[in-house]
Image (tube, rainbow, N blue to C red):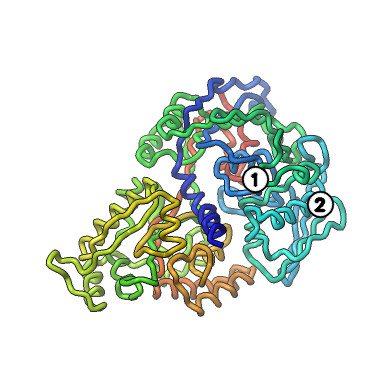
């Protein structure tokens, strides 16, 4: 159980971590950007060429459903397809499923597959492949095993229809099918391969690009899939250049050795990059946030007044400016603002008020020592530059109200043992993806949930989360999540700090990237079949 918990935490952390790790490594791609072939369509799109995208490390395998693998994920979005997928606006859009219906009771999902979809080896994609994939994820404890645990039956009435039955209504089910670890795999390939590693040779998918070559520490090379059922790629080749050092990645991009940065630039470089006319940067708000959390099982944060004092001592704008260099957005609400329909402005993160913070500490029965400190506490974090910078600012802010903070930095494994498994800590910082549905916050604040490492429990909150997760219509869900926000503002198990705003810089000559108007309605956030090179 502890291993499963640790794995789950890695999964939920990885969006924030990957976004911040914009490194590249020792393996510069020596090919450079090849010139487009010169063929131009009637609408002015140039066909051909090679698109070079930064990648911060080597894939662990080529099974996109096996285990958490940040480095495979952008590659997988181009090699494989899902039933549905999520775009850069956090919308669920079509992929292998052309359309789908949900029964009135929310228990049955019927997906109609694209009849022209084929695997890269020419075999047709069928409903049997979908059934095989979902069952294999369960049998092999794949990455999405928790997300699809509600499935009780899968029927395949014909080759292009899949009927999935759930044990109960689940508003987040479709979103999880569109997220991590749910790529549909060819039964005739993966059923004969070792699950954890995928195929030992060429990975076979149904995505817009086909596998070409992989050189460890250098690159993953893909080529255009001429028989893709959707938009056939404009470029001939898509190469992910593996670069593990952030400074090397940055220089490679500026030198034109990368067309697409492949993630967020270093925070220190963000402002400078926005001033360069040859670089295009589009921002996308994600339901991924960073927050401070308390251990409810240890003094002094078992007292509400002490948690409130910390909240009033903190200044999220200052943290964003100093620690995050303006990269992101101040967190003001107790659920992600991506789900704006659910936000209740009545319940917000407290505004900074040092005098009120001190008054609350005294209300908790604390008195200052000879150094003027009401408390001496420890903030435990794992080694991650962003968290260390945030912790430094928080230490300064809390020090001004008489809370002396000692920052303890350890490697992830040690932090996981101490904070997650043994819960021997007072304060910590956590972050990561809180989607693809508003109900995903349940995993962080619900009683005994995997990411609730605070030891927090509120029965009324649990009931509201359960009820909200079973409703599908936003107007019916909104009152439930308004009450969730009320309880969180009253109990303060966490203090939201910042929202993740993703940027993926591209050179000006790169057209049709996943954030562009022409690609956004049809592509996931690292899918490049709409890209063409105007050079």
Given residues 196 and 29, the one toward you in this image is 196
Q: From what the image shows, is residue 43 above or below residue 456? A: above
Tell me the quarter of the image containing the C terminus: top right
Residue occupying image coordinates x 69% and y 71%: 168
Query: How many marks do you count on the picture?
Result: 2
Residue 402: which numbered mark, if any?
A: none
**Residue 231 showing in the rendered view:** no
State yes or no: discs 1 and 2 in contact (Cβ < 8 Å). no
Which numbered mark, 1 or 2, is in the foreground of this view?
A: 1
Residue at label 1? Answer: 64
Above-or-below relation of 28 to 90: above
Q: Residue 300: percent from the left, percent from the top? A: 31, 71
The foreground one among 297 and 18 is: 297
Q: Secondary structure at mark 2?
A: helix
Location of residue 229 (image quadrant): top right
Give the image quarter of residue 290: bottom left
Q: Mark 2 or mark 1, which is nearer the start of the sequence?
A: 1
Disc on res. 127: 2
Question: Label 2 neighbourhood size at 10 Å, few (<14), some (14-19), many (20+)?
Answer: many
Q: Secondary structure at mark 1?
A: loop
359 sits to left or right of 454:
left
The relative height of residue 104 versus residue 78 in the rendered view (above or below) is: below
Where is residue 331 drawn, in percent x and y? 40, 59
């Amino acid at each position: 159980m502890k291993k499963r918990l640790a794995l789950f935490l890695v999964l939920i952390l990885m969006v924030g971590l990957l976004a911040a790790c914009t490194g590249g490594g020792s393996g510069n791609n020596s090919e450079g950007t090849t010139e487009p072939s010169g063929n131009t369509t009637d609408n002015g799109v140039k066909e051909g060429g090679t698109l070079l995208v930064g990648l911060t490390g080597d894939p662990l395998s080529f099974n996109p459903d096996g285990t958490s693998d940040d480095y495979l994920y952008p590659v997988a979005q181009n090699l494989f397809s899902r039933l549905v997928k999520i775009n850069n606006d956090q919308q669920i859009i079509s992929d292998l499923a052309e359309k789908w219906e949900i029964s009135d009771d929310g228990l049955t999902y019927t997906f109609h597959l694209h009849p022209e979809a084929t695997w890269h080896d020419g075999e047709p994609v069928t409903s049997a492949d979908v059934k095989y994939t979902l069952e294999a994820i369960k049998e092999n404890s794949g990455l999405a095993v928790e997300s699809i645990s509600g499935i009780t039956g899968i029927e395949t009435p014909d080759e292009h229809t899949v009927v999935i039955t759930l044990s109960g209504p689940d508003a987040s089910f479709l979103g999880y099918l569109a997220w991590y670890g749910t790529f549909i795999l060819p039964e005739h390939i993966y059923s004969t391969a070792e699950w954890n590693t995928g195929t030992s040779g060429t990975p076979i998918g149904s995505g817009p690009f086909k596998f070409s070559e992989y050189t460890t520490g250098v690159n993953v090379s893909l080529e255009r899939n001429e028989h893709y059922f959707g938009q056939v790629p404009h470029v001939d080749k898509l190469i992910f250049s593996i670069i593990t050092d952030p400074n090397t990645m940055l220089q490679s991009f500026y030198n034109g050795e990368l067309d697409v940065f492949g993630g967020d630039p270093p925070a220190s470089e963000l402002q400078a990059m926005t001033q360069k006319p040859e670089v295009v940067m589009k921002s996308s708000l994600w339901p991924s946030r960073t927050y401070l959390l308390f251990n409810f099982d240890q003094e002094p944060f078992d007292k509400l007044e002490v948690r409130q004092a910390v909240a009033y001592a903190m200044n999220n704008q200052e943290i964003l400016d100093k620690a995050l260099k303006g990269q992101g957005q101040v967190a003001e609400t107790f659920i992600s603002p991506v789900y704006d329909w659910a936000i209740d402005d009545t319940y917000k993160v407290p505004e900074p008020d040092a005098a009120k913070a001190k008054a609350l500490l005294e209300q908790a029965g604390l008195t200052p020592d000879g150094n003027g400190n009401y408390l001496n506490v420890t903030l435990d974090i794992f080694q991650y530059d962003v968290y260390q910078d945030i912790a430094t600012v928080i230490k300064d802010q809390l020090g001004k109200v008489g809370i002396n903070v000692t920052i303890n930095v350890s490697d992830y494994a040690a932090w996981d043992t101490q904070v997650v498994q043994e819960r021997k800590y007072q304060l910590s910082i956590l972050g990561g993806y809180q989607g693809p549905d508003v109900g995903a916050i349940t995993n962080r604040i619900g009683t005994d949930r995997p990411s609730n490492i605070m030891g927090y429990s509120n029965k009324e909150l649990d009931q509201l989360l359960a009820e909200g997760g079973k409703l599908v219509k936003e107007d019916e869900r909104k009152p439930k999540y308004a009450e969730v926000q009320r309880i969180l503002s009253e109990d303060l198990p966490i203090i939201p700090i910042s929202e993740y705003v993703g940027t993926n810089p591209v050179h000006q000559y790169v057209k049709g990237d996943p954030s562009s108007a022409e690609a956004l309605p049809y592509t996931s956030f690292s899918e490049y079949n709409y890209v063409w090179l105007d050079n």
